[in-house]
Image (tube, grey):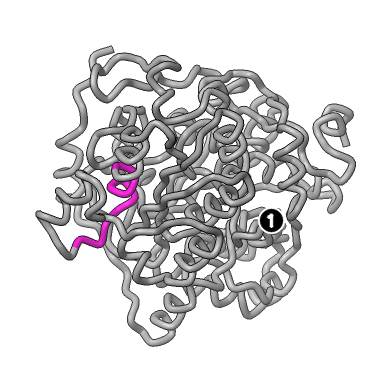
Amino acid sequence: MSEKRKVCLEDHEMPKFWYNIVADMPNPPHPVLHPGTGKPVTPDDLTPLFPMGVIEQEVSAERHIEIPREVRDILKLWRPSPLFRARGLEKLLDTPAHIYFKNEGVSPAGSHKPNTAVPQAFYNKIAGVKRIATETGAGQWGSSMCFAGTLFGLEVKVYMVRVSYDQKPYRRMMMETWGGAVVPSPSPDTEAGRAVLARDPESMGSLGLAISEAVEDAVSREDTRYALGSVLNHVCLHQTVIGQEAMLQMERFDEFPDVVIGCHGGGSNFSGIAFPFLGDKIRNKTNVRLVAVEPFSCPTLTRGSFAFDYGDTAHLSPIVKMYTLGASFMPPGIHAGGLRYHGAAPLVSQLLNEGFIEARSVHQLESFEAAVQFARTEGIIPAPESSHAIRAAIDEALEAKKEGKKRVILFNLSGHGHFDMTSYEKYFAGQLANYVLPEAEIEKALQELPKVDL
């Protein structure tokens, strides 16, 4: 273990610092633009949405940012999260590959999301904020924010994408148990929600729309700020505890991955597992591959356009350069609700565009097939989102078998699927289907990209 890595870890092997990939990127991030003026945003422009502690991290280029003691003390409830070798899955596949997975499902909320919910709640608390407005897709982020909110005495309002609100009632109940107020999005509580309901009363909703509702809520009240569970730089930063721990744990196995895999919706858990390895690759010239895996039915990275776009449907949030399907894109109601986002993290997008990472998409049925194989060999029922990473890991292992060569594979199991059993029920009943997104739908949404003059 390097001396530098020792310095960055607590005695119990939890990181003491977050790792910021911006410090090692060959090119600086593209500017973030104000949705009203089209000009680069200033910290003052972001204060209606975020506390200054979060804003400072959003724009930072410092390589290591210390995790506050108050945050570390809470993260210690489940961190470091365990890393396992999936020997049962290897045996089933009869592969020479070694498959490892980082289990983020051990957190109180059952996913990786508390890694950023806790620090966001902390920075809002010390800034005097009383209330948080946020959105959630499948419910992992919403439940995590409610968990963090109750620890810091914050009121939390969650706009939950309607299709997941109906599909996953137990995640809604988790939020309510932790004191959160949850409404389906589109909702009658905001102008953005009411406008969509007027056009389509049966709308399934989208993350882009739920973000619009939460942002509108936040800027309309002095006591409220907005919290986001993915996409933004500070969220990717907070999640790097995953990859830093994994690097140390892989050393304990005396192995180093040939490929690191994470499912991808907005980009937070992929960034968390991949960015520390990518930084090491850039600095030390390792050959590790970093693979982001998304749904075939919401192919932001694999079929989207790398362009400036709004992060939400109502065009209230800042404009960022990212891979996007268009802010008005309404994805189909797949059961991996946390991956139904039209855009991707700007940092992930830029790194993909510059060739530092890879992206692939997988079908819904194939991802559930992989999830069942994993559950029946490793005993853990994965979230539908995580099953996309499992699918890619299995495919990598089968390629190694075909080649007759060892391949070390690491993937992030971003959460368990205990509250997604209706999805599994539909899979076993043959009620799920693959969905191929027509190119015309993408082209239509991309016609509404903002005009940017830089």
Report whether 141 appears left or right of 300: right
Q: Give the residue displayed 28% in from the left and 47% down from the top.
A: 209
Does residue 257 appear in the picture of this structure? yes
Quadrant of the image for the N terminus? top right
Magenta stretch, residue numbers: 203-212
Q: Nearer the viewer, residue 31 or 408?
A: 31
Residue at screen point 38% across, 19% down: 45
Disc 1, SS: strand
Residue ID for mark 1: 102
- Residue 186 shown left or right of residue 357 in the figure: left
Identify whether 3 is placed above or below 420. above
Picture residue at 67% right of the left edge, 68% below the top = 95
How packed is label 1: few (under 14 Cα within 10 Å), some, or many (20 or more)? many
Q: Main secondary structure of the magenta part?
A: helix
Q: Residue at x 27, y 61 (%)?
A: 332
Nearest the camera: 140 or 393? 140
In this image, 300 relative to 280: left or right?
left
| Res 298 → quadrant | bottom left
Q: Could you say where residue 67 lies in the image, as x and y percent from the top left?
A: 71, 32
Q: Amino acid at mark 1?
A: Lys
Q: What percent of the width, then of the height, locates residue 123?
A: 59, 32
Locate the C terminus by quadrant. top left
- In the rendered picture of this protein, how many numbered marks are placed on residues? 1
